[in-house]
Amino acid sequence: IGNMKSLSFVRWNTNSMTGTIPFEVGKMNKLQEMWFFKNQFTGELPSEMGSMRDMGDLRLHFNLFTGSIPEEHYMIPQLRRWDLYDCDLTGTISTTIGRMSTLQAYRIRENNFYGTLPTELGRLSGLCEMWLHQNDLTGTVPQELCHLRGPNGIVVLDTDCGPTNGVGEPLMECLFECCTACCDTVTGYCVRENTGFIPCMKGV
């Protein structure tokens, strides 16, 4: 697959593909879309994927990966949509994410990410949608990120700011009118702000 250097789109989603993603995909530096979601891929994400300089739409959700997001992935310069939800990934969110100036959607729901949200998320002025719930993230949602909320900024921001298992302390604290949904990390139940559907992503 690494020899297919002129390929722009790969859409292998919704199959029964297994095994690991080969590191050779990093040689496909003209690839703009990679849709591998709803398969049974396993193993760690190859760091070489960070070399895909034209990648704008990376959909890896609903797979069986292990490990964390390689630091190199935070250096993909054109990435707009980054779907990693329901993948069993772990680790923290790198502060390097603040350099991803083109990022519009960052969806990492239902993984095992932990730690606090980096304040560098507040640098993502084009961000409009974040699914952070059903993880092990803790702390307060940074004010720098909350300042991006609004009809011309982030319109979806879901976190685990709801009571844990219905009665316990929330894993996260969210300032008033910052998060659009406060979820229970145990039950998955979310109390959602009625914002309606507001399309926000451009070019994906």
Image (cartoon, rainbow, N blue to C red):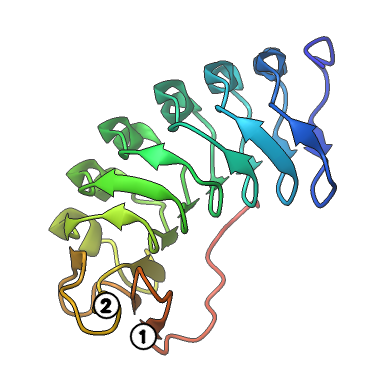
Nearest to the observer: residue 143 or residue 62: 62
Element assignment for label 2? loop
Q: Nearer the viewer, residue 22 or 130?
A: 22
Q: Is residue 105 left or right of residue 187?
A: right
Distance of label 1 from label 2 (alpha carbons): 8 Å
Q: Residue at x 54, y 81 (%)?
A: 197
Whether residue 101 is visible to the viewer of this picture, yes or no, is: no
Q: Which residue lies at the image location 79% right of the left edge and 30% below the top edge?
A: 8
**Quadrant in which the N terminus is drawn:** top right
Can you see residue 164? yes
Q: Please give the name of the residue rendered at 46% of the width and 31% of the height, measured from the top-left corner.
A: 67
Using a 10 Å C-alpha cutoff, classify the residue at mark 1 as few (fewer than 14 neighbours), some (14 to 19) or many (20 or more): few
Q: Amino acid at mark 2?
A: Gly
Image quadrant in which you'd find residue 199:
bottom right
Q: In the structure shown, which secondary structural element does the residue marked by tag 1 occupy?
A: strand
Reading the image, the residue beneath label 1 is 191
Q: Which mark is on residue 162?
A: 2
The disc labelled 1 sits on which kind of residue? Val
140 on left or right of 78: left
Task: Check if mark 1's residue and mark 2's residue have beta carbons within 8 Å.
Answer: yes
Instruction: From the top left corner, tell me how far across and down residue 83 is, in percent.
Output: 56, 49
Q: Along the polypeptide, which appears first: circle 1 or circle 2? A: 2
Horizontally, residue 68 falls left or right of residue 150, namely right
Residue 88's disc is none
